[in-house]
Amino acid sequence: MSIQALLKRQLPQFSLAQVQTLTSQLYGIEGEYREVVSERDLSWLIKQSSGETVVLKISNAIEVEGIVDFQVKALQHIAERDPSVPVPHMIATKSGKLFDWITADDGTAHMIRILSFLEGDVVYDTPAAHNSTTRYNAGALVGKLAKALGNFFHPHARSNIHLWDISRALDLRPHIDDIEDLDLRTLCRDILERAESFTLPKLKSTRWQVVHQDAHSGNMLVDPNNAFLPTGIIDFGDMGYNSIVAEVVEAADSFSLEDDDLLANLCEVTAGFDSSYPLEENEIDLIYDALLLQYAVGSIVVGSRLIHDQEDNVHVEDADKYGIILKRLNQHGREQGIRRLREACRFPVYSPREADDEIFDEHYDELLEKRENKLGPIWHFYNKAMRFTRAKGGWMYAADGTAYLDSYNNVPQIGHSHPHVVKAIARQAAVLNTNTRYVCDIVADYAERLTAELPDHLDTCIFVNSGSEANDLAMQIAKALSGNQGGLVLNMAYHGCTELSAKMSHDSWAHLPPEQWPQDIEPLMVPDTYRGPYAGDLEAGEKYAADMDRAITALAQRGHKPAAFMVDTAMCAHGLTEVPDNYFNLTAEKTRAAGGYMIADEVQAGCGRMGTFWGYRAAGLDHANVDFITMGKPVGNAHPLGVIILSSKMMLQFLNGSSPMLFSTFGGNSVACAAGMAVLDVIEREGLIEKSNRVGDYLRAKLSKLAEKHSIIGDIRGRGILTGVEFVSCRKAKTPASAETDVLIEAMLARRVMVGKGADNVLKLRPSMAWDETEVDFFIAALGDSLEAIAAGR
Ligand code: PMP
């Protein structure tokens, strides 16, 4: 069917008397007739003597049989799939047909059909329905309808060509000059040009299905006694196979010239639609463009009708409206349109995905100021704080779309936004998120799986929400069970931000005057094999461990015995120091001999990063010497989850002692456990532990090659994918090259690599296990380049 043919209405030619006779013969239906204006069909309301009203439709002569069949079957499908969607149902002829053929006096054949009549006031004509609640509810109903049509198929679904179909907007190009208003004509031309290069190609990547395509306020009914409540969607004449986006923008067409915030109307309808039929990211970002296109189409159709078909007044009576609204919508601009639509549906902030996506990064200064004002002057990485809007696998994407390789990666160890974890979180959140006071499958299953490979004395989990909480509680239990109050930690260790875990973090109070140091905590010398006093000593393990005797004595002099030695065996706070193999076992034995417990803080070391699931094993600490394992960060791959693993016997003792009510509201909530479970799935399915070793070895080999050229690299160390690179200005004297390290970190950023430091002169590389050799190569190229630039004083 050509656009030319569609532009002319050519209504079927039947007199009322003829129609009445035919209807009586075919359907046995009689009553009072009232004609209804329709764009291409003839339509009447027939009020029968029973009081029931039906709608009679006679199709335009150019209508194709398959298309009527398509509409009829679609209505049947909706009724079957979701009977709560209020749409008309078909009334069959006496001989059981859902439509039949009739002939006009001029010999043309037409299809006739009857549908039930839906009660309600048309939103367009009902001022009380022009409000945000009704718009949201109407959007939600259109979403429900689209969902019901989601799996409907008909061979004629794409043959229902009609003028208002934005996916065919370019067919209207020859008619742009019919628009009289020159500004509007130019605007429509620009929009069609953009449609050709952007909107329509993007529309192709959205979800397509059969959609109503005409659910605007003129085809939406509301309850006469409650204008907030939509009661029906009518007129399936424009239904066809199209993008979901086309459905949303058509449903949003409820604008009136009195509305002062058109985007608000659009957002309300879209949010309603999204509530019942969730939109995808590429769809929400296209709605604003699609709406402009729809109004450009409207402006062209009306402009053309005004010139060529003056007697047909459909969509012509408010001829100026399309142009006025289009111009006003256009003034908002795409950035504002996208931002508000995203906010309305709670999509995260816009982030460019492809090279040709627009960049909206104008609010950086404003955002930075807001952060400062509302979060306080908290520390940020880099001279200029980075603003990220997206991350995937080993990469993070800045608001301007630039991809940065994340070797800082402190938390999402199996890769940013891992789709399996994301899905598990969403699926569990959609069904149940509750606490450990109830019996829930996921929490018990997760605890069982997490401890499956651990020895019997590490068989019980307590769930909390962070590494700090895990360490805090582990320490509380250690104190309660040992009866001791003292704590042993490494010099400059970090274990958290709660009162007790901060006390166990020498790093958090080392800067204070000695009289303010906690009397019940004693830090130990760092067992450093590269630059410590026993570096290179074959008995370094014993010698460093001997410092624990000093520490225990020091505690005793202050009236304390150790409740625990808490240690991060990855040595993250120290620059991933290489520790003598026997050090941790020796210190664990000494701690126990003094009546304390050994707490392996796996917040950094755990979940495979060190090449074994439990990092302390890689560091040489035997299972048998561990009393508590504490976990955080990677265990939920960035979803807040903390775990303490201990023996059931100790747990019982603690509960029977001081803490019978032990409980954390969010600790072990169903969603956090789903995240934890999904992390374990991924580590297993993707063979990440093996990969952590393979990629880590490759990284260290490449670093060693670089070290041949750059004497600033003093030491390369690490296990699994966790790798430390220590910089020195003199290899022999091992003089820390701290200033150069700072310069290097910024130089790496300029080369799109993010990296953090452990000590002042150590790059602490914690790549996610999503890294492959490709990422390593990118990293090494950036490091080589940065080192050369620094050496050359650039
Ligand atoms: N332990 C270690 C070893 C850590 O590195 C950290 C955090 N940097 C914590 C505990 C505290 O974890 P959270 O920030 O989740 O409380």
Image: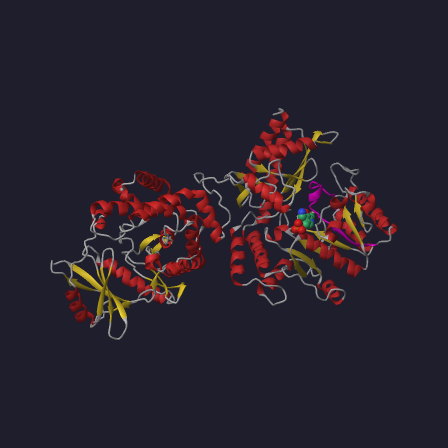
Rendering colour mode = secondary structure
The quarter of the picture where residue 151 lies is bottom left
Q: In the image, what residue occupies the spot 73% across and 37% down? A: 530
| Residue 446 shown left or right of residue 343 in the figure | right
Which quadrant would the C terminus be assigned to in this image? top right
The quarter of the picture where residue 627 lies is bottom right
Q: In the image, what residue occupies the spot 57% across and 52% down? A: 683
Instruction: Identify the residue at the far bottom of this view.
Output: 50
| Residue 56 shown left or right of residue 554 in the figure | left
| Residue 474 shown left or right of residue 286 in the figure | right
Front residue of 357/290: it is: 290
Percent of width and height locating residue 191: 35, 41
Front residue of 761/202: it is: 202
Front residue of 294/120: it is: 120
Instruction: Identify the residue at the far left of this view.
Output: 106
Residue range corresponding to the magenta coloring? 561-581
Q: Indicate yes or no whether the magenta region holds residue 155.
A: no
Q: How many marks do you count on the picture? A: 0
The answer to whether residue 627 is visible is no
The answer to whether residue 347 is visible is yes
Percent of width and height locating residue 121: 34, 63
Instruction: Identify the residue at the far right of this view.
Output: 557
Percent of width and height locating residue 664: 66, 61
Front residue of 33/697: it is: 33
Q: In this view, does 166 lie above or below 17?
A: above
Q: In this view, does 525 lie above or below 683?
A: above
Percent of width and height locating residue 266: 41, 51
Q: In the image, what residue occupies the spot 47% across and 42% down? A: 352
| Residue 346 shown left or right of residue 486 in the figure | left
